[in-house]
């Protein structure tokens, strides 16, 4: 009998989606408007952190106000908390690295003006 057969039945593996935290880009505007409509809230303006999960933005937080929007039909409370934590660290530390990161992101992909 082989080692695999002795080990018993194979356990299913679970693949978790990738979660990113990044500044919103101009091409995220339509997604943020849709997300805001789902959440019955105004779309965030200015510098906005977004949380794409598996490539789909499920939550966003405005850096200046801390106001969040999220997909109310998905489990997003932890994402919003994660975004708030990152936003707080950016605002609290105000380190050179954070300022450089935000400046580079703005230069590479400025947020479109609010409509």
Image (cartoon, grey):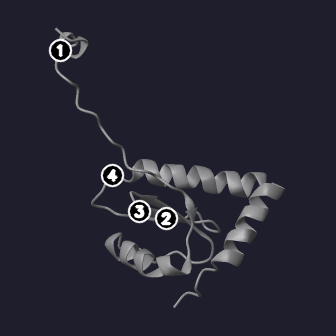
Whichever of callouts 3 and 1 sits on the residue coming sooner in the sequence is 1
Q: Where is residue 61 drawn, in percent x and y? A: 53, 64
Which residue position holds label 3?
55
Secondary structure, mark 1, is helix
Residue 63: name its quadrant: bottom right
Which residue position holds label 4?
75
- Discs 4, 1 touching: Cβ within 8 Å: no
Residue at image location 35% in from the left, 63% down from the top: 71
Whichever of callouts 4 and 1 sits on the residue coming sooner in the sequence is 1
- Discs 4, 2 touching: Cβ within 8 Å: no
Secondary structure, mark 4, is loop
Q: Nearer the viewer, mark 3 or mark 1?
A: 1
Residue farthest front in this picture: 1
Q: Mark 1 Cα within 10 Å, few/some/many (few <14, many 20+)?
A: few
Whichever of callouts 1 and 2 sits on the residue coming sooner in the sequence is 1
- Discs 2, 3 touching: Cβ within 8 Å: no
Q: Nearer the viewer, mark 1 or mark 2?
A: 1
- Discs 1, 2 touching: Cβ within 8 Å: no
Q: Is residue 27 above or below residue 101?
A: below
Which residue position holds label 1?
5
């Amino acid at each position: 009998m082989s080692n695999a057969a002795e080990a018993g039945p194979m356990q299913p593996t679970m693949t978790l989606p990738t979660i990113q935290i990044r500044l919103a880009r101009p091409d995220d505007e339509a997604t943020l408007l849709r997300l805001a409509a789902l959440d019955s809230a105004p779309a965030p303006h200015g510098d906005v952190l977004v949380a794409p999960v598996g490539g789909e933005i499920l939550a966003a937080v405005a850096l200046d106000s801390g106001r969040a929007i999220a997909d109310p039909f998905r489990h997003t409370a932890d994402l919003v908390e994660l975004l708030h934590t990152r936003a707080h660290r950016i605002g609290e530390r105000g380190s050179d690295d954070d300022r450089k990161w935000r400046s580079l992101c703005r230069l590479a992909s400025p947020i479109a003006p609010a409509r």
